[in-house]
Each structure stands twice: as structure tokens, then as C-alpha cells.
Image (spheres, rainbow, N blue to C red):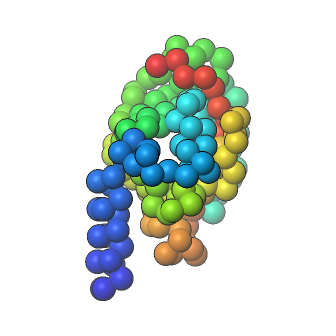
């Protein structure tokens, strides 16, 4: 019970702080991570759940956009037509670890944690889980791979 309360308190505190508000306190690695994450749109290209079949996305996909203010959106879109963004939903996000490897997202249909496995200017690989993967490492998860695209919105 005590660990659950502590976890909830940590989540609440981290949600109140955004990357923009802390920008003066970020080291070079953290600044680089924030820039790579927020300077582009991320197009879902591959998913593999713990239980189930892997799936590749060639044309229709989901697009995620992270803003430096700790807000973001996800929309249905297209790899080939950057103007297509339908059924847009909004969320808030924050890093939960000092090394910026875990993102907590909450909002319309995106609640959960992303453990960053790989982040480059062109690729983002994450492991999604409903609970913090640092605290609860052995839980159902889904691996996602994203490709970067210059932001159009």
C-alpha cells in the first residue's frame, strides 16, 4: 500500500513539472533527448504485443507529436500524405526518470508509460506498459517502432 501511494505521489509531482519549465536545469543529454522527441512527428511503423502478432504499418498509421510544454497529440494519419490528421486526441506527458528514458502519458486513450529503447533523429523504439516499467518490469507490454517526420502542424 505504501509503495502504491509513493508511486502515485511521484506521478503527481512529475505531471506538475513540464520540460519547458525545467529547461534551464537540463544537462546536454537531457536537452538532446527533449529536442529529438519534440522536433518531429512520430509515425507508428511497427508494433509487437507481448501476446499476439506483430504488425507493420505502411500507409495508414498513428502520428504522435510531443510538445516541449508537456502536452501532445495523437492522430490517425498517413505516411504518404502529411496533411492527413484525423480523430486528433490530446494528452499530457512527462519524463519519470532523471535519465529521460521513461515517458508517462495521460489523456484521451494514451494512458501509460513508454520505456525508450532507442531514440535517434529518425527512429523511436519504445516499450509501452500500463504501469511504470521501472517499478513493475514484468508486465504485459507492447513494443512500438516509430519513424520521424518533420512536423507540419
Q: Is residue 82 visible?
A: yes
x, y percent for residue 72: 41, 37
Task: Check the picture and name the quadrant holding the N terminus.
Answer: bottom left
Query: Is residue 142 visible in this depiction of the protein?
Result: no
Please state the horizontal and vertical placement of residue 121, each as a whole percent of the image. 69, 36
| Vertical arrangement, residue 64 with respect to residue 132, above or below | above
Q: Where is residue 131, by image quadrant?
A: bottom left
Q: Which residue occupies the extreme bottom position in the image?
A: 2
Q: Is residue 81 above or below residue 46?
A: above
Q: Residue at x 44, y 23 (%)?
A: 86
Q: Is residue 68 left or right of residue 63?
A: left
53 above or below 87?
below
User: Image height check: is 75 above or below 104?
Assistant: above
Using residue 111 as the reference point, say whether residue 12 is left or right of it: left
Identity of the residue drawn at 60% across and 48% down: 28
**Front-most of residues 51 and 132:** 132
Q: Is residue 106 left or right of residue 48?
A: left
Residue at the location (60% across, 14% down)? 81
Q: How far across and down, in percent of the image, does residue 12 sit?
A: 29, 62
Identity of the residue drawn at 37% across and 34% down: 89
Residue 24 coordinates in the image, percent (x, y): 43, 46
In-front residue for pair 86/18: 18
Amino acid at each position: 500500500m505504501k509503495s502504491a501511494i509513493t508511486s502515485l505521489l511521484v506521478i503527481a509531482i512529475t505531471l506538475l513539472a513540464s520540460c519547458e519549465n525545467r529547461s534551464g536545469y537540463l544537462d546536454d543529454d537531457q536537452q538532446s533527448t527533449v529536442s529529438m522527441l519534440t522536433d518531429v512527428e512520430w509515425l507508428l511503423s511497427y508494433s509487437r504485443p507481448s501476446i499476439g502478432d506483430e504488425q507493420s504499418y505502411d500507409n495508414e498509421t498513428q502520428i504522435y507529436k510531443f510538445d516541449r510544454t508537456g502536452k501532445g497529440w495523437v492522430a490517425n494519419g498517413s505516411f504518404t500524405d502529411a496533411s492527413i490528421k484525423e480523430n486528433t486526441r490530446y494528452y499530457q506527458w512527462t519524463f519519470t526518470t532523471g535519465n529521460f528514458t521513461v515517458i508517462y502519458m495521460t489523456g484521451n486513450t494514451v494512458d501509460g508509460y513508454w520505456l525508450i529503447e532507442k531514440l535517434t533523429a529518425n527512429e523511436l523504439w519504445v516499450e509501452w506498459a500500463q504501469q511504470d516499467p521501472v517499478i513493475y518490469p514484468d508486465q504485459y507490454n507492447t513494443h512500438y517502432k516509430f519513424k520521424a517526420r518533420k512536423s507540419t502542424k
